[in-house]
């Protein structure tokens, strides 16, 4: 996001900013002349004295303000600010589709999306998300880039398309790590989500701050191993774990995922390589090593992707009838002693063979 605007930009304020800049140039101030030289192509090769004498007008000052804000022109800046004001309000979900599968309508009734300037807050039963966004209103279709600052997805970006028609808004988004969609549709394996919303109120929503960046957690010693140590022999238990599994339960850091969202998860094991996906987002991609002599069975994950690549997560597993259950601690944390899924213990999941 390379736009440089206030959180809630106003065209009136930006017009006054341009008028002030032009007045400062006419008064002979050096910073104003430098702003024209840096941001107005027509002034790029001039000296400060030449810029002062050139007779630049308000439209030129507006162009400078636009370029200072990261836009190619004043009309582009104006369209952007007007679109932000058009999005303002409280939006409710009519439908949500993730990777070609529709989320039941009953699961959406307690969710809403709030826009104020270029800040947003998403409120849902599984957690609240806050952040900021940037628009490209001149793209066809228009594009939106979202930065999550606070909440479960803090620190991640997603890229999408949007279509605004009065009090109807359609968003097609790539979940974290996925590419920008090319149209308003999803399919299995795309990593895309299609949201259709209607505006419940056009008033400015309260307390939409965009979130507060969270401090980095205290540094801990993260264990790493030679990947060759995970080139293990396949045992009958490892063979039993192969295939595709559907989630029965998921508890992350003491918080259970609502049952209606479990339908959007899968666990796939081929050999000793496992991938867990929820809502199109890869949550786990790892090689697995088991110590079947331990009670409960000890599980080691060699993480293969993202910031955790080549780190090791320690966990345990057990069978619950034909289901399999895991509790995996974060990298750098000790292996759990039991399946108590309290906050800080890691991720508890239970799976059933598809």
Image (cartoon, rainbow, N blue to C red):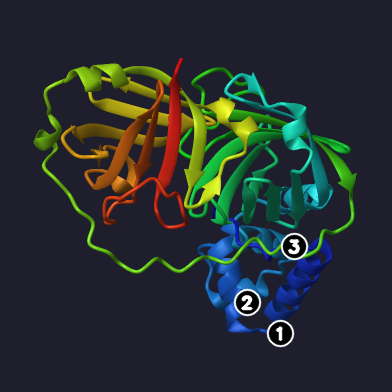
**Closer to the eye: label 1 or 2:** 2
- Asked if labels 2 and 3 touch by Cβ distance under 8 angstroms, the answer is no
Density class for disc 3 (Cα within 10 Å; few <14, some 14-19, many ≥20) is: some
Rendered residue at 58%/25% (across/down): 263
State which tag comes first along the sequence, 1 or 3.
Answer: 3
Please give the residue where the numbered disc 2 appears in the rendered image: 32
* Badge number at residue 145: none
Please give the residue where the numbered disc 3 appears in the rendered image: 9
- The picture places residue 303, in percent across and down from the top left corner, at 27, 40
Foreground of the two, 216 or 69: 216
Residue 350, image quadrant:
top left
State which tag comes first along the sequence, 3 or 2.
Answer: 3
Residue 201 sits above or below residue 264 on the image? below
Q: CA distance from mark 1 to mark 2?
A: 9 Å
Residue 143 sits above or below residue 185 on the image? below
Please give the residue where the numbered disc 1 appears in the rendered image: 27
Give the SS element for disc 2.
helix
**Closer to the eye: label 3 or 2:** 3
**Residue 14 shows in this picture:** yes
Density class for disc 1 (Cα within 10 Å; few <14, some 14-19, many ≥20) is: few
Foreground of the two, 134 or 62: 134
- The picture places residue 346, in percent across and down from the top left corner, at 40, 50
């Amino acid at each position: 996001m390379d736009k440089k605007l206030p959180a809630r930009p106003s065209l009136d304020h930006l017009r006054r900013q341009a008028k002030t800049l032009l007045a400062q140039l006419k008064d002979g101030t050096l910073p104003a002349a430098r702003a024209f030289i840096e941001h107005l192509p027509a002034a790029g090769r001039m000296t400060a004295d030449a810029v002062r004498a050139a007779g630049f007008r308000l439209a030129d000052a507006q162009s400078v303000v636009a370029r200072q804000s990261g836009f190619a022109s004043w009309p582009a800046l104006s369209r952007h600010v007007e679109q932000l004001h058009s999005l303002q309000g409280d939006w409710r979900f009519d439908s949500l589709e993730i990777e070609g599968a529709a989320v039941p309508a009953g699961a959406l009734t307690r969710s809403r999306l709030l826009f104020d300037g270029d800040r947003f807050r998403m409120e849902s039963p599984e957690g609240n998300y806050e952040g900021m966004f940037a628009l490209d209103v001149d793209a066809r279709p228009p594009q939106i880039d979202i930065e999550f600052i606070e909440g479960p997805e803090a620190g991640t970006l997603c890229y999408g398309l949007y279509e605004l028609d009065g009090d109807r808004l359609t968003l097609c988004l790539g979940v974290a790590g996925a590419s920008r969609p090319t149209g308003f549709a999803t399919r299995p394996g795309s990593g895309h989500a299609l949201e259709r919303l209607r505006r419940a109120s056009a008033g400015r929503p309260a307390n939409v701050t965009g979130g507060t960046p969270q401090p980095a957690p205290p540094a801990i010693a993260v264990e790493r191993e030679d990947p060759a140590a995970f080139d293990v022999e396949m045992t009958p238990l490892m063979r039993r774990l192969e295939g595709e599994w559907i989630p029965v339960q998921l508890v992350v850091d003491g918080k259970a995922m609502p049952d209606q969202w479990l339908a959007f998860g899968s666990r796939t094991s081929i050999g000793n390589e496992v991938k867990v996906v929820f809502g199109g987002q890869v949550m786990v991609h790892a090689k697995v090593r088991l110590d079947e002599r331990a009670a409960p069975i000890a599980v080691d994950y060699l993480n293969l992707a993202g910031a955790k690549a080549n780190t090791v997560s320690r966990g345990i597993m057990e069978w619950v009838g034909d289901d399999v259950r895991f509790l995996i601690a974060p990298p750098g944390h000790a292996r759990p002693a039991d399946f108590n899924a309290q906050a800080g213990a890691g991720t508890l999941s239970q799976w059933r063979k598809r």
